[in-house]
Image (tube, coloured by chain):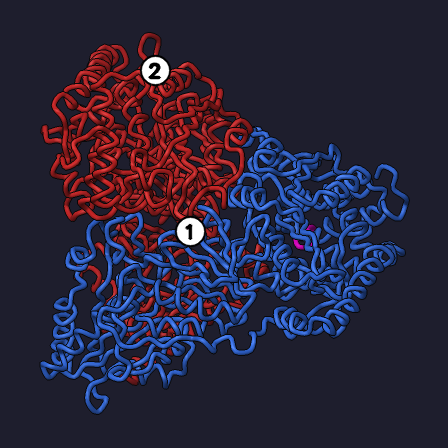
Chain colours: A blue, B red
């Protein structure tokens, strides 16, 4: 290190050798980037990061995002060396370390706190799960937005409750991924002065040199986005790195990109600057050679020299503790002066709901004409949001169609000069929107985002991460079937519902009418650690008469009997979701009139239904009633589970087409007559079998 | 129009008014952009596009891509006015028009050739299906790459068989979508001089003015990508437009972006420059006012003034016919001189296979240790490719892991200075890769692309379009389950298989061993109009002894009995896919040894199995055998269909975790004992029921 003392050099090489040894021991992993970037991460953490290892969830801490998640050992080394303490699910800090040397020795082994890629919730100090490239970058934009929003909401004269910075370490892969481009464009537009991406330009990817795929001028591109662009010519030059970070800290009006030229596998005589250093262990002999080049004992493994942890304690540890304590004492005065705001701040941190959030939830009277569920959702959202100040969100340029705008007077728009606004404009950038929502949720806001259901495809990767991280993000998808009509098959979802339902931990809800929308929102808001999809119609749906049909409260159980045969002994069960429940209800009435004992089941959520007891599930779908019909304007895949062997599934088997709704319902078999016929056939089949 | 004569103005206003009237009649659609861009499209088609309306599939035609697919009436107007003739599925041109005035009058109605967004295959002259933003842009990069590849392969001294240009009309949404950014970066890297994007900068989106989301400097960004950037300050200035297109045509070494400043809804006094002109009809009164501003009869509807179609015939029609005929006669001489190449060229156009493409397909001997299916696929791919010259592909920077590199000597790499290469490097840009594959296939190459299965999420939108367009694209996805081990849950697919299976028209294959890989490739190559996913393991799988087990030819039927109980009377059926077939085979042997009558079914493809006759399906899964176990290291959703009510589904219910393979198999219940236990329980259950 240019100009560094012995202890600095020793600390940097400890990061390097812990990473090398862990990968070698696991016989799996990515050693090259930790070797290259140890000086950078050392400098950032030790000299700048406002982070207290004793309290890794201090709300105003700087965020460090390792978008290059494969370089996870960089982060684990830092968590261990700086002595970060674990936080448990109840936000308590019982004193255990977040990562032990034993965890590092068991890198990529079952049960270790050091998995292959950093996992939020599993390991304290990991600010977001990374690995899929581009996601960390885009998520960090959400964290920076959250910082600005929190500052606007909570800061008061002499009370700077929020002014954290977000540092994101990214690589060539992040620079190539479109999601990061989208996010960078928006970050520039929003002038996020608290955001710093540090781009490790090592020019090496898995297939070889970036010359084969990536010759654009990244600096100029980011200038075009409106960023401040800095360059560090040598990743080992910690003074230059420190200068660049200082420049970032003095730049308050636009985001900063620091381009660092580095050498992957630095110190390894044979793998330095090659893709061989990227994703596999160096090998025992090369490990020794690399250690020799660092002036390290060649045969020592997992060596942490005396004084290194003490050095970190005296640096980041002492600075972080001081900052955090000052903040905590400021919070005490703040609480005295602004008790309501302080309460809100603390509720947010624990993901609690504000009192009375649901006091204004509407109830919709029966109405044969009804309204689209996107419209009823707009009403519900606007009934909740005034009472839930940190519920914020927006759309990927479709708010007038998805109806997710907060329309009450104080709502406002989040723009570069109005960071307190609650309506976000993500632009036509669905993928970045998804990741930004994750970033907002990681900073304890309660975010939602919307687009058409078919375009959920554009944002699947961050939705998966929401589920993996158990974040309470709400994805609102309107235009949920061929029911949208004339825009045609590119816009008509077919396979999206099943794709969403198959994501572990994500709850998908497709309400049937306005009152089911109310209950769906109630379920969603009630989940503090689960993302949800709310799937809404473009077309009007009748508001069912709940005096005649069962209460929409049944939504919370995923499926419920909406109307039944006399004595609860149905011959056939009609199961619908969303817009198709109304057709099923019509069919139910026709069958009833014809003396057929039918049961009507509304099934807004498979996931919630699966969480119910077997007894409840059997009460809704009695095993002995095998005549069943499901009706859903989406792929039939998966419905066998609910209609059973030989049950009828009315659904989509192909893509849709461009035509008015009524023609499509006829063409694809979603008419009243189709449902009644299927029910009669099912009854016939069941009788024959009996 | 500045400097235009009467007939030009009349023609331009015909495009405008046809579009306005169609949207008004449909009471649905997007009038504003056709109103703004009619002069541009007029100039491009009439004065430049090398396209013969009489032969819309002439191989060396210029390609026109309407990435702003919502402005579909622009394209339909042109197809009608220039008199494009329809081509049928057998590549014949019986003489009917591609689009009639009647179709335009029935815009967005069922059965019209003018659906809401342009659909490839449905309407001749539509070069690719567009609507989901960004896709047309990225697809056009594939078309440009194909042009360069075709030129390199087929052009000979004095025989310029291919030199077409690709023109892409895009908007603010395309500029914001990450997939277009990825594609633009790659297009710059590859120096695609035949590619011209025309960016309609109207600064209006659905939520309002682009000021609220999009303030980057697009010109500078494209300069950073290495593009030639031009600007036209007034979309009505056809002379300046023509100059810009000429500049593009003289620029052969880099792609060109022409930024056109336009006014959405041009001519509409009240909706001009507003988002109200974007996605809804103008309204009868405003239609009249717009027509008045054009000097058009206010009450005329669908008016095509005398002389307009003749004017187009004399312009694009005559030029196109001349070029196409010259090309056809050149092809005759070419055929005489290069009969093999001419034959190849024609086979490609009809999507026929080269003779003997499968002559070198390997057969793999039984081997208990075996090899990963990614490795056997590499062997098969490299056995096919030398005999299939236009089979080309690559990876999103993972070829060393997905093993999709063509390794034989002449294969080469596709780079800016080696356009004949067959190995493509897409960079870490999965989304653009998917769209580029579509572009290659639209230009009749036979493309494949690869990444890890979990990252199929990044490229879902173009995969959906492959299926909608019925393109023979092969998506190769390795690292197909928790079987990849230590990279952990971000990299371990769980829900991806079911997501792919649910896309209508896409065939997903997950072969169990090397010989199933051979047969899977045979199926894939045999499909001329269907995309396929080939799902491959990272870990070694035993090559099953096909003297003991049934032939792998059964792959073609989607599922087949690999081993059976004596007399074909099983008590229990074990169904596996991919890497889990080996576990099922082991369990089968254990059960056999214990005197249990079991059947072993390998089920590499649900979609192919569903296409079989009911008799065949029942022969594999006899309805009377209700004791069934499915084993697949993915989501269990959808398996009920094959195991039936109460059948056992061994699969994933959560995300995976980072650990060595064997620990994960144990943790998630994929051991031999788990399968045997499930089978015994199933038998018990069936007996109790009987």
Q: Chain of mark 1?
A: B
* Main SS class of the magenta portion in the image: helix
Q: Is residue B62 visible?
A: yes
Q: Is A25 in the magenta?
A: yes
Query: In the visual, does A642 lie left or right of B247?
Result: left
Q: Position of residue A502 (x, y in %)?
A: 41, 63
What span is in magenta?
A: A23-27
> Between B376 and B347, which is closer to the camera in this rendering?
B347
Q: Earlier in the sequence, mark 2 or mark 1?
A: 2
| Label number found at residue B543 | 1
Q: Chain of mark 2?
A: B
Which picture quadrant has residue B485? bottom right
Measured along the vertical axis of the image, is residue B673 above or below residue A223? below
Measured along the vertical axis of the image, is residue A2 above or below residue B332? below
Instruction: Give the alpha-carbon distance from disc 2 to disc 1, as whole Å.
Output: 44 Å
- The residue beneath circle 2 is B155
Q: Is A642 in the magenta?
A: no
Q: At 47% across and 70% down in the image, what residue appears? A: A384
């Amino acid at each position: 290190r240019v100009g560094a003392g012995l202890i600095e050099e020793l600390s940097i090489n400890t990061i390097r050798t812990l990473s090398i040894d862990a990968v070698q021991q696991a016989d799996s992993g990515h050693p090259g980037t930790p070797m290259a970037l140890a000086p950078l991460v050392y400098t950032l953490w030790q000299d700048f990061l406002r982070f207290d290892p004793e309290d890794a969830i201090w709300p105003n801490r700087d965020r460090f995002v390792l978008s290059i998640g494969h370089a996870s050992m960089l982060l684990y080394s830092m968590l261990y060396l700086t002595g970060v303490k674990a936080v448990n699910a109840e936000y308590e800090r019982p004193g255990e370390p977040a990562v032990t040397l034993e965890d590092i020795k068991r890198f990529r082994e079952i049960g270790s706190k050091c998995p292959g890629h950093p996992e939020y919730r599993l390991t304290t100090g990991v600010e977001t799960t990374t690995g899929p490239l581009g996601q960390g970058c885009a998520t960090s934009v959400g964290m920076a937005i959250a910082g600005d929003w929190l500052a606007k909401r909570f800061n008061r004269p002499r009370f700077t409750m929020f002014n954290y910075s977000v540092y994101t370490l990214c690589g060539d892969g992040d620079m190539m991924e479109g999601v990061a481009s989208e996010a960078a464009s928006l970050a520039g537009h929003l002038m996020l002065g608290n955001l710093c991406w540090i781009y490790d330009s090592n020019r090496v990817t898995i297939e070889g040199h970036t010359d084969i795929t990536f010759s654009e001028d990244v600096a100029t591109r980011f200038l075009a986005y409106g960023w401040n662009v800095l360059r560090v010519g040598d990743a080992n030059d910690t003074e230059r790195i420190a200068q660049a970070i200082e420049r970032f800290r003095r730049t308050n009006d636009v985001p900063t990109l620091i381009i660092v030229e580095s050498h992957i596998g630095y110190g390894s005589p044979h793998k330095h600057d090659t893709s061989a250093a990227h994703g596999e262990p160096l090998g025992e002999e090369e490990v020794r050679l690399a250690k020799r080049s660092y002036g390290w004992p060649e045969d020592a493994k997992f060596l942490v020299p005396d004084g290194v942890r003490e050095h970190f304690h005296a640096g980041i540890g002492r600075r972080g503790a001081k900052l955090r304590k000052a903040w905590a004492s400021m919070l005490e005065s703040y609480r005295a002066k602004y008790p309501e705001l302080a309460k809100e701040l603390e509720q947010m941190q624990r993901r609690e709901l504000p009192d009375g959030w649901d006091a204004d939830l509407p109830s919709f009277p029966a109405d044969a004409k009804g309204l689209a569920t996107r419209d009823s959702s707009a009403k519900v959202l606007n009934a909740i949001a005034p009472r839930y100040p940190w519920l914020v969100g927006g759309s990927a340029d479709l708010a007038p169609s998805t109806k997710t705008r907060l329309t009450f007077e104080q709502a406002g728009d989040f723009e570069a000069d109005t960071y307190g606004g609650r309506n976000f404009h993500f632009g036509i950038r669905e993928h970045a929107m998804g990741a930004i929502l994750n970033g907002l949720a990681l900073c304890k806001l309660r975010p939602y985002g919307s687009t058409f259901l078919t375009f959920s495809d554009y944002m699947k990767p961050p939705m998966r991460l929401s589920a993996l991280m158990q974040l309470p993000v709400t994805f609102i998808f309107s235009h949920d079937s061929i029911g949208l009509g004339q825009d045609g098959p590119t816009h008509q979802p077919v396979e999206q519902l099943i794709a969403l339902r198959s994501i572990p931990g994500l709850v998908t809800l497709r309400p049937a009418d306005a009152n089911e929308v109310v209950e769906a929102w109630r379920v969603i808001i009630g989940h503090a650690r689960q993302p949800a999809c709310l799937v809404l119609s473009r077309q009007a749906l009748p508001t069912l008469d709940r005096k005649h049909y069962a209460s929409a409260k049944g939504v919370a159980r995923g499926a419920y009997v909406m109307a039944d045969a006399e004595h609860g002994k149905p011959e056939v069960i009609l199961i619908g979701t969303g817009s198709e429940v109304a057709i099923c209800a019509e069919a139910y009435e026709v069958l009833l009139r014809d003396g057929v004992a039918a049961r009507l089941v509304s099934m807004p959520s498979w996931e919630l239904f699966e969480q119910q007891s077997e007894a409840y599930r059997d009460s809704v779908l009695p095993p002995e009633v095998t005549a069943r019909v499901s009706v859903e304007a989406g792929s039939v895949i998966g419905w066998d589970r609910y209609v059973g062997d030989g049950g009828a599934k009315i659904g989509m088997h192909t893509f849709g087409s461009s035509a008015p709704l009524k023609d499509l319902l006829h063409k694809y078999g979603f008419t009243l007559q189709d449902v009644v016929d299927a029910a009669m056939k099912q009854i016939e089949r069941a009788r024959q079998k009996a």
